[in-house]
Image (tube, grey):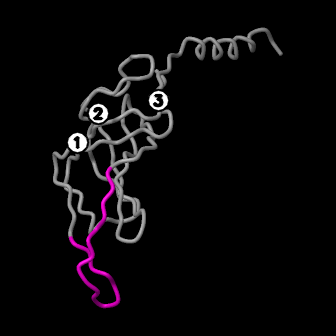
Amino acid sequence: MPKSMWFVPALLLGMQIFASARTIAPGTTVMVTIDHEIDLQTWKQGQTYPAHVARDVWASDGVLAFPSGLQAEVVARQTGPHQMALELDLVAMNGGHYIVSSTGPRFDLPVTGYHNGRWSEANVAIPPSSTLSFQIQQPVTIFE
């Protein structure tokens, strides 16, 4: 291999050494404000809802990881019959998206009756500008 070919791997290794990373630890609370109403009666599997980070989130080393105001997405998931949960799905920062594994508010949808072979559930909606709390379940590593 020509001597100049060793330059590229050495350069890449040097970039990795000097790259900084921050980690948001499991158990960290992320407060998120919902941008639009979330209607749990009409949700669709995989549908996301726009939101934004309501308060600064700090990494394990005390460095700011997610400043307030960052765009985020919340997803509704069915956790059981007539039960729903909201989860923080991702946070957008510096042109990238950070996938977040989280737990959030859970809802029991009151059953109001049985009609046309289906249970009817009462309408549960989260109004816009509601601030919800999510807890990080897996470490989130942010590279700069």
Q: Circle 3 — which element?
A: loop
Q: Circle 1 — which element?
A: strand
Circle 1 residues within 10 Å: few <14, some 14–19, many ≥20: many
Q: Nearer the viewer, residue 97 or 129?
A: 129
* Mark 2: amino acid: Leu
Is 10 located above or below residue 86 in the figure?
above
Report the residue marked by disc 2: 70
**Residue 143 falls left or right of residue 83:** right
x, y percentage for residue 6? 75, 12
x, y percentage for residue 4? 74, 10
* Mark 1: amino acid: Thr
**Residue 106 falls left or right of residue 124:** right
Report the residue marked by disc 3: 25
Q: CA distance from mark 2 to mark 3?
A: 19 Å
Q: CA distance from mark 1 to mark 3?
A: 21 Å
Residue 33 disc label:
1
Quadrant containing the N terminus in the rendered view: top right
Residue 143 disc label:
none
Magenta span of residues: 105-122
